[in-house]
């Protein structure tokens, strides 16, 4: 008697469909420029943007209420008599906006550009820091 070792599992087919769908979403999201790492600490947030070839003097970085906005332009410089045969790096004007998880102490915002990476450090506003609240009880025996 022949035993079939392969059993059709409809759930594995559905898993493949969802995995492919999730991969396509993450790829689309990952294509945004510039790419950024966001790291959250207890009282701070650090964003590191990849900006190779962007003049840091022409980067516009603004904070307003609960968001951080980055605007800049990346140009490909071509000399007279040259033409671009292939371009795989993003070019042109771009903008990214980030909703922040807390209010920021505007006096403690720091931004540094080094080796094509713009690092922005945002400190939580002191009034926003966690505070333990004591609970008063009355007449509890």
Image (spheres, helix red, strand yellow):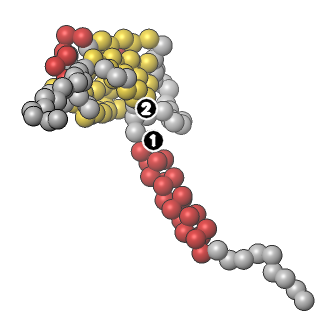
Q: Which residue is the extreme one toward the right?
A: 1
Q: Position of residue 98 (x, y in %)?
A: 28, 33
Q: Residue drawn 37% across and 23% down?
A: 41
The quarter in which the N terminus is drawn is: bottom right
Q: Secondary structure at mark 2?
A: loop
Residue, disc 1: 30
Residue, disc 2: 35
Q: Quadrant of residue 119?
A: top left
Q: Position of residue 128 (x, y in %)?
A: 19, 23
Q: Position of residue 100 (x, y in %)?
A: 26, 31
Q: Position of residue 71 (x, y in %)?
A: 27, 27
Q: Which residue is the extreme one toward the front?
A: 141
Q: Secondary structure at mark 1?
A: helix
- Residue 108 visible? The answer is yes
- Badge 1: how crowded within 10 Å, few (<14), some, or many (20+)? few
The quarter in which the C terminus is drawn is: top left
The tally of labels here is 2
Q: Relative to 128, is 21 on the left or the right?
A: right
Q: Residue drawn 23% across and 24% down?
A: 132
Q: Quadrant of residue 64?
A: top left
Residue 80 vs residue 93, the one in the foreground: 93
Residue 79 vs residue 66, the one in the foreground: 66
């Amino acid at each position: 008697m022949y035993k079939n070792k392969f059993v059709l599992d409809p759930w594995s087919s559905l898993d493949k469909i969802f995995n492919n769908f999730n991969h396509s979403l993450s790829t689309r999201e990952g294509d945004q420029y510039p790419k950024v790492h966001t790291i959250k600490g207890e009282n701070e947030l650090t964003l590191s943007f990849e900006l190779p070839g962007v003049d840091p003097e022409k980067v516009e970085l603004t904070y307003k209420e609960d968001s951080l906005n980055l605007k800049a332009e990346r140009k490909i410089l071509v000399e007279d008599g040259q033409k671009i045969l292939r371009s795989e790096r993003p070019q042109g004007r771009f903008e990214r906006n980030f909703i922040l998880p807390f209010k920021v102490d505007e006096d403690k915002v720091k931004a540094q550009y080094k080796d094509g990476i713009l690092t922005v450090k945002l400190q939580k506003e002191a009034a926003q820091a966690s505070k333990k609240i004591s609970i008063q009880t009355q007449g509890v025996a």
